Image (cartoon, grey):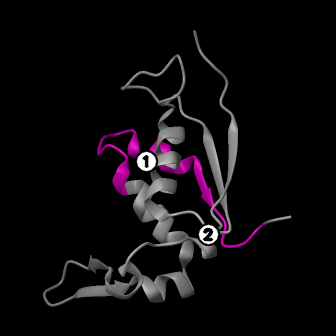
């Protein structure tokens, strides 16, 4: 019993980041399908448009920061959400969805099914 994979297009304009990310993560995993199993990739493909118009609640735009480290001593770098929204808004959604998915071998396969566009594509 297998279902076909569908392609879902989600408009991120005016949506809150966390609620949008949980919706995307559930679609990628296939949690709403009858044939859902934990150890198989039965999820659908997701296309997100208008990533630049995502909404963050509270004071997250001013306060939230993402850290990255190169592996060398003293190379911990911080990126603020304000800069990411301006330069790479698709990265905010990608990081949020990635952290909502289970940390296992299927995580890379699920993320391959996610496509994020900065603006609306015609």
In the current view of this chain or complex, which residue is farthest to the top? 1
Please say if 9 is above or below 89.
above
Q: Position of residue 52 (x, y in %)?
A: 62, 76
Quarter of the image holding residue 79?
bottom left
Q: Residue at x 60, y 36 (%)?
A: 44
- Which of the labelled discs sits on residue 16, or is there none? none
Please say whether residue 107 is one of the residues in the magenta stretch: yes
Q: Position of residue 112 (x, y in %)?
A: 54, 49
Please say if 107 is above or below 71.
above
Q: Is residue 55 left or right of residue 115?
A: left
Highlighted range, magenta: 99-120
Mark 1 vs mark 2: in front: 2
Q: How far apart are marks 1 and 2 (CA)?
A: 21 Å
| Crowding near the residue tagged with mark 1, few <14, some 14–19, many ≥20 C-alpha atoms within 10 Å | few
Quarter of the image holding residue 118?
bottom right
Please say if 75 is above or below 118.
below
Instruction: Write down the residue under mark 1.
Output: 108
Residue 20 versus residue 86: which sits nearer the camera?
A: 20
Q: Is residue 19 left or right of residue 6?
A: left
Instruction: Write down the residue under mark 2.
Output: 51
Circle 2 sits in a helix, a strand or a loop, which is it? helix
Please say whether residue 109 is one of the residues in the magenta stretch: yes
């Amino acid at each position: 019993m297998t279902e076909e994979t569908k392609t879902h297009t989600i408009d991120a304009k005016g949506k809150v980041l966390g609620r949008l990310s949980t919706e995307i993560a559930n679609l990628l995993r296939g949690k709403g399908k009858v044939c859902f199993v934990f150890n198989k990739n039965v999820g659908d493909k997701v296309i997100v448009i208008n990533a630049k118009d995502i909404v963050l609640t509270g004071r997250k735009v001013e306060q939230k920061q993402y850290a990255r480290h190169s592996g060398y001593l003293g190379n911990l770098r911080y990126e603020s959400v304000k800069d990411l929204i301006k330069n790479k808004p698709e990265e905010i959604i990608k990081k949020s969805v990635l952290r909502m998915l289970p940390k296992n071998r299927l995580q890379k396969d699920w993320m391959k099914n996610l496509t994020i566009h900065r603006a609306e594509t015609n």
